[in-house]
Amino acid sequence: EHGYEHGSLHWNKERASAIALIPLITTQFVYGPHSIVDGLLGVVLPWHLYLGFDSCITDYIQKRNYPRLHKLANWTLAGTTGLVMWGCYEFNTNDIGITELMQRFFTA
């Protein structure tokens, strides 16, 4: 079980990842595609999404009401987040990269 400090720590992580996304996204609009920004976006964006979905699991699939489903949802979230990070790595190293994709998307 988590104590009261877990909620505030989770909230701080969510806000920190949201604030970290601001310069990462605006940097690519100003300077164009860059491999370092691609790598950072490939980690920070899935982490931010993980924290958001973790909050949904905590709120709507409570451990005390649905112990098995809660555990399954947490494992599924962790597995899919890992797969998304791996997919971002593959896309950044073997294809055009996240920032180039965003640039093409907004200029099309």
Image (cartoon, rainbow, N blue to C red):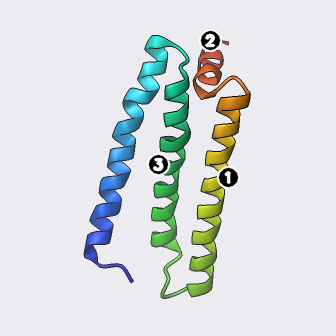
| Disc nearer the start of the sequence (1/2) | 1
71 in relation to 32, above or below: below
Q: Nearer the viewer, residue 91 or 15?
A: 91
Does residue 82 appear to the left or right of 13 in the view shown? right
Q: Tags 2 and 3 in contact by the CB under 8 Å rule?
A: no
- Quadrant for the C terminus, please: top right
Percent x, y of residue 103? 59, 17
Q: How many marks?
A: 3
Amino acid type, label 1: Leu
Q: Residues within 10 Å of mark 1 (few under 14, many from 20)?
A: few
Percent x, y of residue 12? 30, 55
Secondary structure category for the residue under label 1: helix
Residue under circle 2?
Answer: 107
Q: Residues within 10 Å of mark 3 (few under 14, many from 20)?
A: some
- Quadrant for the N terminus, please: bottom left
Residue under circle 1?
Answer: 83
Residue under circle 3?
Answer: 48
Rounded to the nearest whole Å, what is the CA distance between mark 1 and mark 2?
A: 29 Å
Question: Which quadrant of the view contains residue 13?
Answer: bottom left
Rounded to the nearest whole Å, what is the CA distance between mark 3 and mark 1?
A: 15 Å
What residue is at 73 percent from the left and 26 percent from the top? 95
Does residue 93 appear to the left or right of 47 in the view shown? right
Amino acid type, label 3: His
Secondary structure category for the residue under label 2: helix
Secondary structure category for the residue under label 3: helix
Percent x, y of residue 87? 69, 43
